[in-house]
Image (cartoon, grey):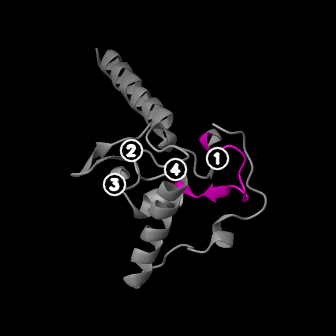
Amino acid sequence: MKRVKLTAILILVLAFAAAGLALAQDDDMVINSKALGEHARPLVKFAHARHSEKIPDCTTCHHDFSPTGNRGSSEGQFCSDCHSAQPTAKNSVSLVMAFHKQCKECHRFAAGKGQPSGPVMCGDCHVQGATTAQK
């Protein structure tokens, strides 16, 4: 009986661990959207793990936004599912602006509070060497 309980507990632990790994994102990712076509600047390498350590609420970046505010998480979706290459009547924030606004505003906010922050200048994010297939 004891062995059956231990086996069941072990199976549950392994199942939860596997689920966590399946949902986890890469530590570093390259932001590359086929919705933008040919990129004018080098791709951006994004340190997801480092950001998620400092910003534990995923909905800060993975948002389901409406004019009345953030309704919840859009995790698992691409930004291009809501933001297109050009602004539309349905969504006035283009995909490029969504990326830039999200990153730069957060970095400026942290710097304004005297906290460590990231870059806000083009060449500090768009550096040579970040390549991956488009999604």
Distance of label 3 from label 1 (alpha carbons): 23 Å
Mark 1 lies on residue: 32
Mark 2 lies on residue: 89
Q: Which mark is residue 57?
A: 3
Q: Nearer the viewer, mark 4 or mark 2?
A: 2
Task: Residue 96: give x, y in percent of width and height.
Answer: 55, 55
SS of the residue at dot 4?
Answer: helix
SS of the residue at dot 3?
Answer: loop
Amino acid on which the number 2 mark rests in the picture:
Ala
Distance of label 4 from label 3 (alpha carbons): 22 Å
Question: Label 2: few (<14), some or many (≥20) within 10 Å?
Answer: few
Foreground: 132 or 91? 91
Are dots 4 and 3 in contact, CB under 8 Å?
no
Q: Is residue 37 rendered magenta in the image?
A: yes
Distance of label 2 from label 3 (alpha carbons): 29 Å
Amino acid on which the number 3 mark rests in the picture:
Asp
Q: Is residue 106 left or right of residue 71?
A: right
